[in-house]
Image: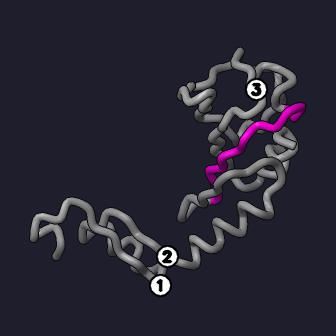
């Protein structure tokens, strides 16, 4: 209804997960579910490493995790291509000193880098070890 009145972005709060696919077909841009928000915040606190945010990818067995690299963590010891990082995981982006970086094989993470990691759930524990 909102889009027919010129609203550029629509947001809907849902309780029933069955409505997720329906909402996409009727033009809702963003969905909010308080259970998902609560779960993501809980995951942030139970994950090991310096996690600043967690997002589960609905309908998949995957997560997006933002880690802040700590001093002396295993992930800072070698370039990415020399680490035994799980195959089912990818460091997709880094923010260093406010500058976005897409890391490649010879890139080496440093303390305070913000990293975005995409991973299947089965690899998360191993990833957390790199960031401790």
Q: Choose between 125 and 40: the one closer to the eye.
A: 40
Q: Secondary structure at mark 1?
A: loop
**Which quadrant of the view contains residue 13?**
bottom left
Is 15 magenta? The answer is: no
Is 65 magenta? The answer is: yes
Residue, x 76% and y 26% (percent of image)? 110
Q: Is residue 5 left or right of residue 76?
A: left
Q: Is residue 23 left or right of residue 44?
A: left
Mark 1 vs 2: CB contact within 8 A: yes
- 3 or 2: tag closer to the N-terminus: 2
Q: CA distance from mark 1 to mark 3?
A: 41 Å
Q: Which residue is mark 1?
A: 15
**Which quadrant of the view contains residue 91?**
top right
What mark, if any, has residue 33 been given in the picture? 2
Image position of 36 with respect to 112: above or below: below
Instruction: Name the residue furthest left.
Output: 5
Query: For the magenta stretch, what is the residue range?
Result: 61-74
Image quarter where the N terminus lies is bottom left
**Which quadrant of the view contains residue 81?**
top right
Q: Secondary structure at mark 3?
A: loop
Mark 3 Cα shell of 10 Å, populated few (<14), some (14-19), many (≥20) = some
Q: Which residue is mark 3?
A: 110
Q: CA distance from mark 3 to mark 2?
A: 35 Å
Image coordinates of residue 93 in percent, x first then y, are 59, 33
- 1 or 2: tag closer to the N-terminus: 1
Q: Which one is closest to the eye, mark 3 or mark 2?
A: 3
Residue, x 66% and y 37% (percent of image)? 114
Image coordinates of residue 46 in percent, x first then y, are 80, 63
- 1 or 3: tag closer to the N-terminus: 1
């Amino acid at each position: 209804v909102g889009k027919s009145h010129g609203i550029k972005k629509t947001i809907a709060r849902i309780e029933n997960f069955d409505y997720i696919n329906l909402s996409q077909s009727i033009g809702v841009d963003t969905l909010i579910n308080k259970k998902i928000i609560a779960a993501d915040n809980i995951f942030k606190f139970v994950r090991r490493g310096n996690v600043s945010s967690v997002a589960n990818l609905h309908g998949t067995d995957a997560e997006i995790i933002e880690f802040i690299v700590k001093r002396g963590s295993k992930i800072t010891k070698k370039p990415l291509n020399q680490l035994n990082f799980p195959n089912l995981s990818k460091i997709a982006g880094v923010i260093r000193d406010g500058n976005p970086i897409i890391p490649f094989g010879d890139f080496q993470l440093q303390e305070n880098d913000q990293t975005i990691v995409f991973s299947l759930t089965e690899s998360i524990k191993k990833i957390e070890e790199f960031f401790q």
